[in-house]
Amino acid sequence: MEPYSIDLREQVVSAIEKGDSSFRKVAQRFGVSKNCVERWVIQKRTQGHINPCKQGGSVSAAMEHQAQLLALVEKQPDATLAEYCELLFDKTDV
C-alpha cells in the first residue's frame, strides 16, 4: 500500500490545528483512520514534518544468525523460546 499523500496529511493536520473538529470527525471527513490523524499530529509536533516514514522492515537480527539458531535447536531441541533467546544472545549479543 502506498503512503498517503503529503497534501492529504497537511489538510488533516491543518484541520486539527485549526480546532475545526475532533480527531474522529476529521478522520471521517478525510477518509482515514483516527490513528492516522493522531500519528500525523504527533509527528508534526515532535519532528516538525509529516513526510511518510520508511515502510517495511529489515531482516530480523535473529535471521542474520539463522545458522547459529538452528545449531542451538539441534543441540537442545527441548528448550523453550525464552531459553533460545538467551542462548542466542550469549553467542551473538543479539
Image: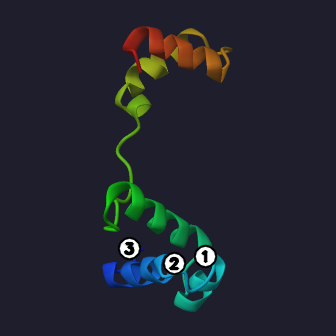
Compute the Cα span from label 1 to label 3: 19 Å
Tell me: 44 left or right of 32: left
Tell me: 73 left or right of 57: right
Tell me: 41 left or right of 56: right
| Tag shown at residue 16 | 2
- From the image, which quarter does the C terminus lie in? top left
Residue drawn at x 31%, y 67% is 51
- The residue beneath circle 3 is 3
Between discs 2 and 3, the one toward the N terminus: 3
Mark 1 or mark 3: which is in front?
1
Q: Secondary structure at mark 2?
A: helix
Q: Secondary structure at mark 1?
A: helix
- The residue beneath circle 1 is 23
Compute the Cα span from label 2 to label 3: 20 Å
Give the amino acid at mark 2: Ile
Image coordinates of residue 83 in percent, x first then y, are 62, 14
Compute the Cα span from label 1 to label 2: 7 Å
The answer to which image quadrant residue 46 occupies is bottom left
- From the image, which quarter does the N terminus lie in? bottom left
Give the amino acid at mark 1: Phe
Up/down of 3 relative to 89, above or below: below
Residues at badges 1 and 3 in contact (C-beta under 8 Å)? Answer: no
Label 2: how many Cα within 10 Å (few below 14, some 14–19, many 20+): some
Residue drawn at x 45%, y 67% is 40
Residue drawn at x 61%, y 73% is 34
Between discs 1 and 3, the one toward the N terminus: 3
Between discs 1 and 2, the one toward the N terminus: 2
Pick whichever, 13 or 8, lies toward us: 13
Residue drawn at x 39%, y 31% is 61
Label 3: how many Cα within 10 Å (few below 14, some 14–19, many 20+): few
